[in-house]
Structures are given as structure tokens and as C-alpha cells.
Amino acid sequence: MNTTYDVRVWAIREHKGKDRKTGKPRSTYRVRWMVAGEEFGETFQTRALAESFRSRLITAQREGIAFDVVSGLPEPMARELDTKSWYDHAVAFVDMKWSRAAPKQRKSIAESLANVTVALLATDRGAPSADEIRQALYKWSFNRTRREEGPPPDDMAATVKWLSAHTVKLTDLTDAALIRKALDTLALRIDGKGAAANTIARKRAVFYGALRYAVELRLLEAHPMDFVQWAAPKSTEEVDRRSVISPAQALVLLAAISVKSPRLVAFFACMYYSALRPAEALHLREEECDLPESGWGVLRLTGSTQHVGRTWGDDSTDLREDRELKHRAKTATRIVPAPPILVRALRWHLAEFGAAPDGRLFARQGYGGGPVSKETYSRVWRQARKDALTPAQQRSPLGKVPYQLRHAAVSLWLNVGVPATQVAEWAGHSVHTCFSRSTPSASTARTKRRAAGSPRPWRRRRTRGRPAGTLPRICRDQ
């Protein structure tokens, strides 16, 4: 918006004439002013309306408010005149973020904006159901790939058309009550129950970013959420100690996996012994592994393979996408040590199954050798928990998801005395995250447990056919 302070406001000019319908004498009143040498005017039917408008111009001029050169109006009035609807702005925000966002981030943005839009409707008259609104927004409006393919599907067309005309204006978001209503909506799940604290924080960050983009475009004078005292539930970044797997439990689980899914033993071993993310393990190539016959090896990570879902990645036809390491440049690499037990597991894996044509270690059997799907390794992990853990442990958070193997690896490194900066470098995150994603050492944990009167930690127990702590055959020295 091009603005100036060169403003002159003239007196109201009365124009006498006749009414077109009745022919009776009638006067109109025109307010005239000049902005940067160009004359502007506005005509009103009564003097009172003209005086009110002229006083707003004079007040803005006296308070030092800049005037828009194009419309001739004070900046707040010009912004209100040119404001977008929330729907149009949210679509523009998605398009701005799309090219530089990872597929998972794109899905998170779409989900968050779809949830909050339900609370930003200008009217309920003729409104589709909340589920129809969320589906249309998530699957089409806030997915740039789908919008570029063509008009919305027939089952969503009516909903999209209604939304494009019936969401609030951006200037309406200066109302604190409306902002609070939107934030309260983000704090709920679809079923009406409270959402997890981390989920609320993530969705609130997306909503805040969308409004900040409006401020950046000068569509809003200030960020409206800065004036609302809304307390979000406290989120915890610490890992639940009950979910972290001990070395003995890791061996038991790997042994269970080796019985039914030997192709994935080394995959899970990479996550536990070298703290790889699942996506980084799926991207691992044979040439990136330095595996000596004995001793420690080295893994040189160059990227990650993300399960993105169709239409969310840059290639709309593929469910998976190779990307750079998390929070790293496209050409960045990360060197991670591989302990002897992992070296033996990887050497056995290569000798037994080989690598895919592209060098990938963990590929699907058949189907062109693509990376192992998330559904596959998640199913294998659930079966391993069922086979290797006791019923009580299965009900607990212990190793509920494969990613907790990575948490256990970070905790193990810290507990054996590896400097936090080195652990953070190996794990590929900050020192702060390193501490928040780990658990205290055994002595500290024991002291806290005794002070709180908590039960003793997990003890080794015999599992089906194999004593706890026994190495899988493929990981033992031959």
C-alpha cells in the first residue's frame, strides 16, 4: 500500500437538484479532499452523513495517520475497504507455504486451518455440516496440488462455493471474542473432547502464522492474537520414562522380530543403536555404510524417505518422497557411529537380502523394490510387542511406537557419559531437544522413584521360548 501524509480536506459542497422519482427539490452533499495532489470526493444524501465522514478524515489527518494514494482514504479505512475474507486469505497462506514446506507440514497446515475455519463463519444460514466443511477444506481448498488439477469434486463443489462467500472478513478478526472462539475450537478434537496439549500448540502456531501473514501484507494493522489472554494447556516435551526401552528389552524385541520378519531386524536396530529416524533408516543406502568386519562402523546419512500420502508431495503420484535431512540443507550429511552389534546386523542383512537396485537397504520384497511402507513396519512392531512383552508391558506405554527406539538411544548415550553436544550432533537435533527427549540416568531415576514410593522398574523375565536379554542369532558373533 502506497501512503502519504500530503492531505488537504476541503469544506462540504452542497449540490441542489431534483429527486428523479418525485421531481421535488433535493440536495446532496459532497466531501472533497486531496491526497498527494490528486482530488477525491464522496457524495452523501444528508449533511449529517457528510459531516461524519469528513470528521473521520480530519481526525486521521490530525493524528498523523497515513493516507492511501490509490483510494485516498486513511490507511485503516483503506485496509478495511480492500480486506479479504478469511477463506481467501487462508488459501493464499497455504499457497505461500506450499513450495517450501515438507509434505507432513503441508498436511498439518491444512488440518489446522480446516479446523479453525469452522469457527470463522459469517453466518450459519445454509451452512454445510462441520464435517463437510472440514473435508472440503482439507482435501481440496487447502491442497494446492488438488486445486491446480481442476475444480472441486461434485460432492464438495457446493460446500466450497458456500465457504468462499460466507467466512468472516479479516478485519472482523480484530474482535477478541472471535479470536477466543477460534482458539477454543482448536483446543477440541472432532468428537468434542479436549485435544492433546502438543496438538493444540501445533494448530495454534499455524493459526498464528496465518494471521501474521495478514499483518505482513498490511491487511491487518496488528496481530489480533497478541491482545487475547488465552492460556493454552501446558505441553510437555519430555518423554514418558515408561515408554523408553532398556537394552535388555530391545534385544528381546529384536529377537521376536527376527523370527517372523528378519528383513526388518536391521531396520529397527538402526533406530535403537544409532538413533535414526524411521525416515532416515528407509533412505539408508549401502554406499553410505562403512561396515568393517569387526569393531565400530559409520553411517553417513544424506536424506530421509517420507511417507507423504498422495497429492501432498511434489510428485502427486507417489506416496513416498525422498527429501533432505530434517532441518538441514539439501546437500547436508550427518555422520552417526554404528556400534559393533549394529555393524553385524547390517552385514548379515546385506549378505542375506542384499540391497535394492538403487542401493536402498530396506526395500519391499517385490513391487519394484520401493521403500518399506509405514504400515508394514508398524504392523511388524505391534506383533513383536505382542510376542516379546508381558501382558502388563503391552498395556503400558513401553515402546508403543517404533520412534521410541530413537528416544531410548539418545537416553542411553547420555547415561553412559557421551557429551550432550555430541549426542545432539549424532541425533540431528538441538541440545535442548536432546535433554527433553531423554530420560534421567539410572541412579537419578532410582532416587526419584524411592522418594515418590514408585514400584521397582521392569525386571528381566522369560518370554516365549527365549530368555530376556538373549541376542538374536543374526546379531551374535559367528
Image: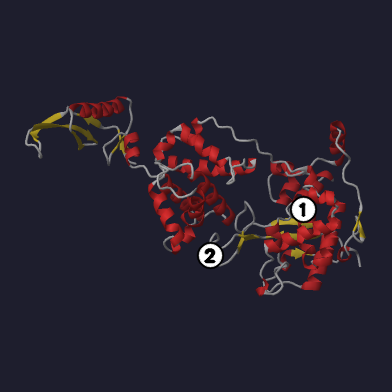
**Side of 341 where 208 appears, left or right:** left
Q: Which residue is mark 1?
A: 405
Q: Quadrant of the C terminus?
A: bottom right
The residue lying at 59 percent from left, 61 percent from top is 309
> Mark 1 falls on what kind of element?
helix
Give above or below for 169 relative to 94.
Answer: above
Q: Is residue 361 visible?
A: yes
Q: Which residue is mark 2?
A: 316
Pick whichever of labels 2 and 1 is earlier in the sequence. Answer: 2
Q: Dividing the picture into quarters, in which one does residue 84 lie? A: top left
Query: In this view of the protein, which residue sits in the foreground, 213 or 461?
Result: 461
State how far apart marks 2 and 1 are (Cα): 31 Å
Residue 295 at x, y percent in the picture: 86, 60
Give above or below for 478 relative to 27.
Answer: below
Mark sitting on residue 33: none
The residue lying at 55 percent from left, 32 percent from top is 230
Q: Quadrant of the N terminus?
A: top left
The residue lying at 76 percent from left, 58 percent from top is 382
Query: In this view of the protein, which residue sits in the foreground, 257 or 357?
Result: 257
The residue lying at 76 percent from left, 62 percent from top is 380
Q: Dividing the picture into quarters, in which one does residue 120 lie? A: top left
Residue type marked 1: Leu
Residue 107 at x, y percent in the picture: 56, 53
Residue 50 at x, y percent in the picture: 21, 29
Residue type marked 2: Ser
Q: How many marks?
A: 2
Q: Dividing the picture into quarters, in which one does residue 185 lie? A: top right
